Amino acid sequence: MDDVAAAGRPSGPVRETGDRPLLLRIEEMSKAFPGVQALDEVRFDLHPGEVHALMGENGAGKSTLMKIVAGVERPDSGVIEVEGRPVHLHRPGDAQALGIMTVFQELTVLDNLDVGRNLLLGREPRRGPLIDWSRLYRDGQQSLDDFGVDLDAHRPLDRLTVGAKQLVEIVRAARLEPRILIMDEPTSALGRREEELLFAVVERLRAAGVGIVYISHRIDEVLRIADRVTVLRDGRWVRTTAAAELDRDTLIRSMVGRDVSDERLGRTAAEERPVRLELRDVQRLPRVNGVDLQVRAGEVLGIAGLVGSGRTEMGEVVYGVAKRDQGSVLLDGQELHLRNPGQALDLGIGYVPEDRKAYGLVLGMAVDENLALPSLRRFARLGLLRWSALRASARDWIQRLRIKATSSRQVAETLSGGNQQKVVLAKVLSRSPRVLVLDEPTRGIDVGSKREIHELIRSIAEDGVAVMVISSELPEVLAVSDRIVVMRGGRVEGELDPATATEEDILSLAFGKGQTA
Amino acid sequence: MSTTAVGDETEAAGRGVTFDVRTATPVVGLLAVCVYFAVRTPAFLQVTNLRNLLVVAAPLAITAAAMTLVILVGEIDLSVGSVAALCAVAFALALANGMPLALAVVLTIALGALIGAVNGTLTAYGRIPSFIVTLGMFSAAEGASFLVSGRQTIPITDLTFFALAYDARPLGVPVPGLYALGTMLAVGILLRYTAFGRSVYAVGGNPRAASLSGVSAARTKLKSFVLAGSLVALGGLAIAARLASAKPDAAPTLTLDAIAAVIIGGTSLMGGRGSVARTALGVALIAVITNGSNLLNIHADVQFTIKGVIIIVAVLIDRLGSRS
Amino acid sequence: MSTAEAASSQQVVVERAHDRRRLADWGIYVALGLLVVLFALTSDAFLSVANLTNIGRQATLLMLAGFAMTFVLISREIDLSVGANATLVGVVTATALHAGQPTLLAVALGIGLGALIGAVNGALVVTAKLPSFIVTLGVFYILQGVARSMTGGATVLYHAPAFRDIFARGELLGIPTPVWLVVFVGVALHLTLRHTRFGSNVYAVGGDAKSSAMVGLRVAWTKFGVFTLAGALMGLAAMGPIARIGNARPDALIGLEFDAIAVVVIGGTSFSGGRGSLPRTVIGALIIAIVNNGLTLLNVPRDAQLIVKGAIIVVAVLIDRWVGGRGDRV
């Protein structure tokens, strides 16, 4: 294996706690960014062979804490000790030299290279000044085999699924014999089979004495796999408890500070309402392979499925962002030929994209301008914009959706995630859509705001809009939908009634009826 | 991107100029060079010189307004110098061949718009990086100028043209200055008070979000390039008015000057931030440097170097200003 | 449809993209062949030994500049100063030779200057995180100003037969020395790019700089190295033209950056970074050299040639887009 990780390990007296030495100890760590105290005297520690989960709402400070440990950010104050020795981490290389490896939420593998080159990136074996390619691929394949990942080291990365790429990323970190492995939302891109592979990797590492920091929003996963759980709230340490002593509600209460029940808001339509949106054998290769579904006016249709099942692409076809190869999309019975989102908006289709920062908002512009973007022409008279009307409309929406902003002139970038999403939603609603497609509407948003947005979605439906909610969060799908459709491999695998369905039902469809995972 | 300062909330709307390093630089720079030249040579502050400065700066102001549009929408135009020269040559040839003045003006502007359309189509629809497209267009326009003019200088003798475009002094101000001011004002109003203007900022700030909101990034960019091309043609006319002739290398430093003026004024190369007001500051700065350097007999080649340094310094400041 | 079927239809699209790329790859060989046939048919002088040697000589300059630009483009940057760089180095080297400096020293000075300019570009791009096209544009203007000021616009003459023999007139085993130079340099660069960590880093950084940094690659040093290397190569490239003509003009190689970009893009290196190779740049250089030469033989005015070259670049980039991915997304 690799020599680089083995070098630079501190030796010497180790601080003992109980009978296990601490791999990592963080004490009174604080970090402020302009306008927000991301961490406030946080503490955290890690034993060898332990899986220690880190949980909290968005903005709680989890990612910041781990970025500091990974050497990506620097703290304002506080102590970090690795195996009893205080350390100063100025760059990722420092952390790696101490055996701290990180698997980030965003993929950092390189698409223009193959699996083997990615696995040994920066550590390519050499013969003299030149790279020893045969050894590179041999070592890479060995690591893949050791961790039970069924991939060929020569495979170009751009031919892999997102889940496979995530596994490559994990193997890349794991093969370096880390002391501490930080994993930030590792299962977000994984299918169920890949998830099990991941858990197997985690077990293997745990048995080898590696300490694992596991950041995740998925409570069931955490309670299953972790030894201890630390909860952060608003940058402060709330509690560190053995996982065995925790249950879902207690955990949520610690994160939110109030009781949040998983009440299901949906109801099955009693009356027959007209079909607003219909998809007939819609295909967009390779992801969408023949989707048939209908959404009625006043109904919330939840679209569930594993990552890679084609849901986002289907949403994009409906909105005219992506061209369909086959099939038809009908709005109120009329076939649509959308060339661009502008047309979709004109026809009454609204779309809230998956990534609000990249696709939903112009971060450098004010809230009111973002809100007005789909309607610019309407605010113009004789070619000139009526700013007063534009601002009044914005203030109206801010009030209606309870958006927390200092004024309509606040720059979008400075809003919190939940409020940013509300702005995107308001922007879309301002065109009075008859069909609304939302893709991961509450991803990365705190529990309280999630609830608000779910209620908003329900009230939008009650106004007669046909709503499609695409989501990977099973509790969300169950909570907000009147009907659930599960997609798999680019097609509809089945339909469920949220009043009676369970998360297991959804997953079983997502994996395929009568097939082993 | 880090959090933006409070002042930026008005900046994003292009409403008013806030005081930060992006604004301080051209203001302080302008004051500094004015003081420097005023001290070094008495000729600088004379009314005749200031009037001359205004006249010489006019084509730059018009061209820089065009450049501002293109940079705001997130692109760049490296062809403005040779396109302006080409338009001037075409205009002069048209007049020399007996075409009526009004028609010649209209056709010249149409030529500029057409070239802008080519730039814009290749950039927005062909999705080729604009610096490559406009680099190619720079070359092509230069070649075309040489071909069409036969490498000769073409004189202009139309007195009406000179009267309207150069000699007139309404209220004692040389008319080129008024045209320049008017152009900048018009572009500024366009950017602040029209839907198109907001689209420019949106597309420059985040083309994908703009597109999903129904604002076509491609169409906005194309329109920006077409408009910019028309303005560049106007700039070419202004140059022709001043030189009373047209030749292919009539404006050797125009591209350089225009880019330097826009960036030092504080408009961001990233797109979505900036304004014509800022460019006006930058134009003043560049014009003063050119004028003062000529008065001090600093050779044109050295000015090249100085302006190159200004561009780099300006981009540095732009970058520093983007981190809070 | 089962997961296997879905996967295989995904495979189809990926294969289609790979097929397009392979088609474009073969395309340049076909284009090269067609061009040779076209010009051979339309001009008698094309296939003469003298003319082919001429093409070869033009091509060596384009290849060296192309090598420099290939590294830069793979790392997802651009260098618009290369022409001004080579021009200034030519002026400085000629001045040194004219002042009686020994050949070795003058050449070292020239290449060193080129490397220094590249290093300045690299430092500005990397430490100040400035967009490379504007930085190198600024440097372009600065260098032009310096070259012109240094010479007052005049041509620099020098007399150094040894220098001229090495870089232009000499022959080894019947092959002109410039060709040997390009071959030697090309092989060394190819090994560096394909078989060293630095080269691998160049591809990684060009593919995704942010991810490369997170993995611990030294992105800054890699980019800095690329720019410095490009600068040094341009310094080397400057030697050939001044050796051939026997003097140095302060505007001699302005516009070379344009040709270098054309050469590299036609060869299939993409602006998006992360992909490209030197052998293909060689083909690109041959194509451009042949086009230049053929058009001149056909008495197409030089000014029109500029228009043609502009069009060629645009077409090449359009093809790159077509190969690169779907154009039907917003």
Image: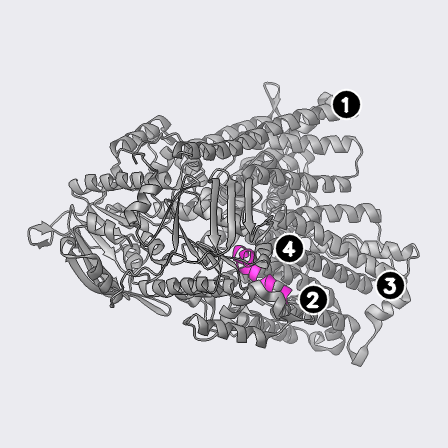
Identify residue for label 3: B102
Identify residue for label 2: B61
Q: Chain of mark 1?
A: C
Q: Residue at x 48, y 71 (%)?
A: A397
Q: Are marks 2 and 4 on the same chain?
A: yes
Q: Residue at x 50, y 69 (%)?
A: A366
Task: Check disc 1 and report its element: helix, strand or loop.
Answer: helix
Callout 2–callout 1 Cβ contact below 8 Å: no
Q: Position of residue C200 (x, y in %)?
A: 42, 37
Identify residue for label 1: C41
Identify residue for label 4: B219
| Numbered range of the magenta stretch | B195-213
Q: CA distance from mark 1 to mark 4?
A: 44 Å
Asked whether residue C123 is in view, the answer is no
Q: Quadrant of residue B273?
A: bottom right
Q: Position of residue A62 (x, y in %)?
A: 28, 58
